[in-house]
Image (cartoon, rainbow, N blue to C red):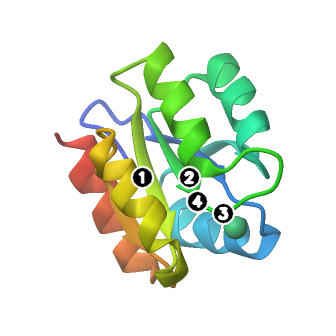
Amino acid sequence: MKGLRKDGRAIRVMAVDDSPVTRKMIKKALVPEGFEIVGEAGNGRDAVELCEKIDPDIITMDVTMPIMDGLEAALIIKQKNPRQKIIMLSAMSDQNIVEEAMSRGINHFCSKPFTAGDMVAKIMQVISE
Ligand SMILES: [Mg+2]
């Protein structure tokens, strides 16, 4: 199981996406590997609030969402905790936002659509940094 730390503790993931179907896909990819989904949010504003409460090891952050988009949420979260690990989930149509994010120091991305293997591999890479 890849989603466990050396001490056996599960890697705690917060999944942020306005699509419940995508959140379900993330869970399906990660839970069988031992990761724990400790929180879910459907927009950036809820993500910022929830992140403070649950302090996840890593966040998967959709880009395009209502109320507050993923880039704005990621920047607020990073401002509060520069060490917070965040992976942006970006579709082809998000290319401008991806460039903006990279210019502002957010540089982990997983492109949509993703496979379970893509998601697990990306999380393991970012966690190990
Ligand atoms: Mg979206």
Query: Which mark, by number, is residue 64?
Result: 3
Mark 2 nearby-residue class (10 Å; few <14, some 14–19, many ≥20): many
Along the horizontal axis of the image, is 128 left or right of 117?
Answer: left
- Looking at the image, is 32 positioned above or below residue 54? below
Q: Could you tell me the amino acid type at mark 2?
A: Met
Label 4 secondary element: loop
**For mark 2, what is the residue?**
61
Residue linked to disc 4: 63
How far separated are the C-alphas under marks 1 and 3? Answer: 14 Å
Question: Tag 4: Cα neighbours inside 10 Å, few (<14), some, or many (≥20)?
Answer: many
In which quadrant of the rendered image does the N terminus lie? bottom left
Q: If you read the primary sequence from the N terminus, does the residue marked by circle 4 or circle 1 appear first?
A: 4
**Vertical arrangement, residue 79 with respect to residue 57, above or below:** above
Q: Where is the C terminus found, in terms of image quarters?
A: top left
The one nearer the camera, 40 or 33, is 40
Q: Which amino acid type is shown beneath numbered disc 1?
A: Ile
Tell me whether circle 1 and circle 2 mark residues in contact (CB < 8 Å). yes
Q: Where is residue 51 in the image (x, y as percent from the top left)?
A: 63, 27
Q: Mark 4 to mark 1: distance in Å?
A: 10 Å
The residue nearer to you, when weighing 4 against 118, is 118
Asked whether mark 4 and ligand 1 are closer than 8 Å, the reply comes as yes
Q: Are marks 4 and 3 in contact (CB under 8 Å)?
A: yes
Image coordinates for residue 127, horizontal then vertical, percent: 28, 42
Q: Can residue 33 be seen in this view?
A: no
At mark 3, the secondary structure is loop
Pointer 2 with pointer 4, Cβ within 8 A: yes
Disc 2 vs disc 3: which is toward the camera?
3
Residue drawn at (29%, 30%), measured in percent from left and top?
Answer: 7
Q: Is mark 1 within 8 Å of ligand 1?
A: no
